[in-house]
Amino acid sequence: MKSISIKDVAAAAGVSPKTVSRVINGESHVRPGIRDTVLRVVAELDYRPNPFARSLSSSRSYLLGLLLDDPGSGYAADVQLGALLRSRVRSYHLVVEPVDLTIPGWINDVEGSIRALRLDGAILTPPLCDNIKLLEMLDLAALPYVRISPRGDADRSGMVEMDDVAAASDMTRHLIELGHRTIGFIKGDPNHSASRKRLDGFLATMAAAGLAVDDRHVLEGDFSFRSALGPAAALLEQGNRPTAIFASNDDMALGVLVTAMKHGIAVPEKLSVVGFDDAPTARVGWPPLTTIRQPKADMAAAAIDILVDPHYRVSVTDAGFRRMLPYELIVRESSGPPNG
């Protein structure tokens, strides 16, 4: 097959090869409409510049790093896909770097990888986006980075997030409107900023509706399927058990579904179960989960766009480098009125 050249892209987009080069390299002085057209043609033709030749002709490596604490999770899979596809469109290559905070000397391993790869920038996901040791190392290395869903410190870097508090509030309101008054909640990993935000949204909405929350109905998980099994059993074995359980992510919600099945409790007839994320498993489990669709792939893509913007390196605090993406409440068969 004939390889696609920059001239082919220019001809299809109706612009000059120099304009295509400017768009691919993230340079300014290109009108947004033309930039969008060029990027669309690049994707349609699957044009891929030679990264070795590009790196020789500039000080860039055209490599971006995606740092993840759990690359095997459903969340990580969606983030990787979004970052990979957008990197390809922007003619960069993506390197996924697992970071295990439990390993002694992990910070030295990350620093060594960054220097060896000559990364042009990095994307940090929770909880790495809030790890001070990692952030300080990247600052000292003068490596640009963008954080996804950080806890705070907004002036430190560009960021992409969604409103976890509002999303959790909407989900809680959905259960209340169905008629539920006693709702259990399983928290996520305390090291993830989203865990606290989702709990806050739940508690605030319950309070606004005049509904008390029993401390025994709010239990700890860590976002994993297994971590929800104990809390779910504890909630379902209580004398005053909840008629609905809101798990902080879909993996834990699936753990609740399995536990309910073991206890012979029908969902949603005798118990509503809802999650958060809209992971692929939310659609294939039974019953399919009511959940919050978090735009994980879109968030990663937006982070790539920020990172390759030529102005980002000199103005990380610019308001244009703060992105709040929309979420969506997805109602499926796992939620219904209490007692059928």
Image (cartoon, rainbow, N blue to C red):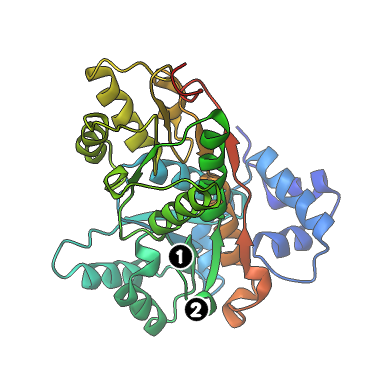
Residue drawn at x 35%, y 80% as measured from the top left: 136
Residue 293 visible? The answer is: no
At label 2, the amino acid type is Arg
Image disc number at residue 150: 1
User: 284 or 208: nearer the eye?
Assistant: 208
Q: Which residue is mark 2?
A: 156
Q: Position of residue 33 (x, y in %)?
A: 83, 55
Q: Position of residue 219 (x, y in %)?
A: 27, 46
User: 135 or 312: nearer the eye?
Assistant: 135
Q: Residues within 10 Å of mark 2 (few under 14, many from 20)?
A: some
Residue drawn at x 61%, y 67% as measured from the top left: 322
**SS type, badge 2:** helix
Question: In this rendering, which labeled residue sits more in front, label 2 or label 1?
Answer: 1
In the depicted structure, whether residue 108 falls above or below residue 325: below
At label 1, the amino acid type is Pro
User: 22 or 104: nearer the eye?
Assistant: 104
Query: The N terminus is located in which quarter?
Result: top right
Q: Are marks 2 and 1 in contact (CB under 8 Å)?
A: yes
